[in-house]
Image (spheres, rainbow, N blue to C red):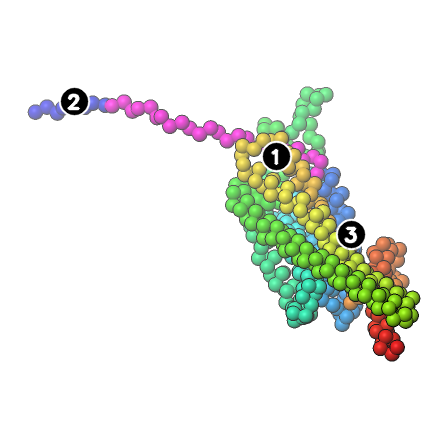
Amino acid sequence: MTAPPLSFVAPRPSTTVAPPPAPPPCSLDESYKYVFLPVCYSLTLLFSVSLNSVVLVRACRSRRRWTTSLIYMVNLATTDLMYGLSLPFLVHSYALRDRWVFGDFTCRLVRFLFYFNLYCSIFFLTCISVHRYLGICHPMRTVSLQSKRAVRLVCALVWLLVFALTCPIFRFAQTGLVSRSKPLDQNQGQNRDPDSDLSWDQTTNSSAYVNCWDDAIDRELDHYIPYGVALHLIGFFIPFVVIAWCYSQVVRTIVHTLRSSSSSAADDVQAADAAERASRASLSVADSQYSHYARRRRKSVRTIVTITLLFALCFLPFHVTRTLFLLLRRAHSADCGLVQIVSVCYKLTRPLASCNAWLNALLYFLTGDTGGPCCVGGRSAPADGALWWPLNKLKKDAVEEENEDKMEAQVHEESKTSRVIF
């Protein structure tokens, strides 16, 4: 019995189509940042270290006179000083065209300090806004929440919360090798090294150097983007909504109080005219009452405007451009021209976000906190010198304004007593 012949069936050609190759990553022109960022970070280093050191030294000299507002400002100055001391590493790196020579751990620490300072500032400014809201809109029902002990507890929770939010940066931020193509010399028709770097590979026409990545390397970008977006949402957009709501309620309360005070002042004037008793004195008392409330309104509005400008100038542009940049990096089919524009905007807003490290110190002078040791009796210390005269002038004006408020209140009480006597 013979075996049946074997038949071979030719394999059918595969009908599956291979996916198109991923487009090459966009080559971004970042030559501008090697001059712009070192200059901006150097100025931030100068102002941040000097101003925040002044705030901390003066605060430590009078710990017994600390107010709740000053406790928040000391915490702000501490985190801003920590960030300022890390800036020399970034200035050195950008001056050497992104070359990093300080090791992997220092890279992770410097990147961590940037975001830790950023979100500590945002959360402490949010706490100041909520504190002012409770003091103006609900002064009697929230007395226990405005005590020094409660404020210290809130500050400790802020430090822990921001550390928990930003500690993943230690994992994502790291050093890595980056290749850079070598341009051709148009005059001599040969390769030219613009940085006088001797590590050029003549076969591949490129060089490799160690870079400190700000967010994440390319292979971990898909894991970093969800964390980065969540960090922006929790660390900025939610506090921004809270601050906007608090200050809308504060403005509403101030306007309502001013209307009530102006109407009461008008009633006093009418009563004085009807009784024909010291009409001029009554008019001056009524005017002083209104002036007292007007000065309090200006002080509250000044703090509102200062914090709002901090958010508008420092935080909002940075978070918007950075979110767009991360999303475009993940979208591999994005137009390279659009990516270049967003990248430039993102790099330009980074120094603005760093400016909060010294702009927060201005808030200390602008609020006119009498618990701080900036000025005694409305005058700055003689050893301050002429360097700080603009800040001392702001502080002096604020203290004088508070003294005028006390005088106006005293006049108001005396006027009540005089009405009882007569």
Disc number for residue 391:
none
Q: Is tag 2's residue or tag 1's residue first in the polypeptide sequence? A: 2
Residue drawn at the location 48% of the way across and 29% of the way down? 21
> Closer to the camera, 244 or 108?
244
Q: Which residue is mark 3?
A: 47
Residue 63 position within the rendered picture, expressed as x and y whole percent measured from the top left: 75, 70
Q: Is tag 3's residue or tag 2's residue first in the polypeptide sequence? A: 2
Q: Main secondary structure of the magenta part?
A: loop
Region rendered in magenta: 9-33
Q: Which residue is mark 1?
A: 339
Q: Residue furthest front?
A: 274
> Closer to the camera, 114 or 237?
237
- Disc 3, disc 1: CB below 8 Å? no
Amino acid beneath label 3:
Phe
Q: Residues within 10 Å of mark 1 (few under 14, many from 20)?
A: many
* Residue 276 seen in this snapshot: yes
Residue drawn at the location 77% of the way across and 56% of the way down? 302
Q: Which residue is mark 2?
A: 5
User: SS class of the residue under badge 2?
Assistant: loop
Magenta-span inclusion, residue 20: yes
